[in-house]
Amino acid sequence: MEFIHTADWHLDNPFSSFDPETRAKLNEARYESVQMIFEYARKESIPLVLCAGDQLDDGQFAEKGVLFKLLELVSGYPDIRVVMITGNHDPNLSGTVYSRVENRLFPANLLFINEKRVLTMEDLDARIFAAPLSRKNGTVNPLTFIRAGEMKGGLINIGLGHGSVAIAPGKYSPDDFPIEPGFAQSAGLDYLALGHFHSFLKIDDRTYYPGTHEKLTFDDNCGVLRVRIEGKGSLPRVENVAEKTSLFSWKTRNLVLTGSSLESFKQEMEGAKPDNVVRKIILSGMLDVEQYNFYHDILERFKDNRDMIEDRVRINPDEESILNLTDGFMTGVVKRLLELKSQGNDIRTFPGLEEFSDDINAEEIIDRALLDVFEFYREREGT
Ligand SMILES: [Mn+2]
């Protein structure tokens, strides 16, 4: 048998760190990408799609329109059976949008599961143990209702759940519906289709997280899994087909600016924004005052033309520009710092710093102090 395992669509995610236009595009892409999953399944004659929860980013507060849009999409593929459970973002709580929309409006091909159930699909040689969530947090494995006695016959046994397997590095939390490592094996499942983590993760030969189908952050590693199982007991063959169904590419660029690279930086910022790409540009480097002014001007003019800018560029001021900015007492402090710098002394010769370890670079500390003084005055002047 063959099926698609997908999860964590997080439709209607706020994408709050983006501008409204990009936000809307990213959200629309999440629906389009779901549609592409169904198109792929249809093209490949895959009769079943398993959705392992968190279809909606916030099931409690989502407007009905969000669910209607999803239901309409699913209804366009009556040839594909869809088994959908609730996750911790869209749990079966009172007032959830799934309950606010009348059940008779759900398409016939959608098996929406909001209570633990065993689904027998003789025609697909499969039995599905579906474990939807009805809370946001829980300390018990939601799949423990599976009984070995229910595994009888020749059907392929598939678990469908939402929670965190304890071996997932850095992601596991005990109130996050913990699932014991090796659970698929011990429960006698041929495959355990999980949702919750937003990046593809293979736990063992029978346990997988697809990850989200379309990135939510720059760090996500998307997944949509095509799973083939020959028969009860045989090992699943799992292929990640996300490349065929996802739309946006999220690119991170690191640019270290120098005086000579400013012109190409300007051209890059002026350039047209490509479709279906979100970019994070991390800018760093040290510029002198004149270069910094040029840089800052470009940034101000074109930053709205880019999705995400991280500005870590610092000014490396010459002595004259610092002294020109400061006045009174601070001019004296700056002069003293410059004097100490020119002497290239060990930091421990400075009064009061005798106890400092010798791996501290005195010149770096002085530069840093000068820079802080400079940026303080510069900001105060509003330049
Ligand atoms: Mn989740």
Image (cartoon, rainbow, N blue to C red):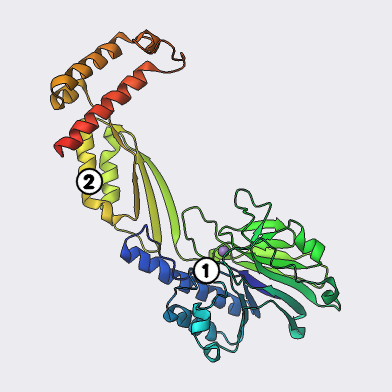
Q: Quadrant of residue 365?
A: top left
Q: Quadrant of residue 248?
A: bottom left
Q: Residues within 10 Å of mark 1 (few under 14, many from 20)?
A: many
> Is residue 112 left or right of 125 when viewed as pictured?
left
Disc 1: which residue: 9
Rendered residue at 34%/56% (across/down): 307
SS category of the residue bearing label 1: loop
Disc 2: which residue: 298
The one nearer the camera, 351 or 155, is 351
Instruction: Give, as a three-letter code, the residue at label 1.
Output: Trp
Q: Residue 373 placed where, x, y %? A: 24, 27
Q: Residues within 10 Å of mark 2 (few under 14, many from 20)?
A: some
Rendered residue at 24%/32% (across/down): 375
Task: Please indicate, yes or no, whether residue 26 appears anywhere in the rendered image.
Answer: yes
Q: Is residue 133 above or below residue 382?
A: below
| Circle on res. 95 | none
Total numbered circles: 2
Instruction: Give, as a three-letter code, the residue at label 2.
Output: Ile
Q: Quadrant of ligand 1?
A: bottom right
Pick the quarter of the image with the C terminus: top left
Task: Please indicate, yes or no, whether residue 46 appears anywhere in the rendered image.
Answer: no
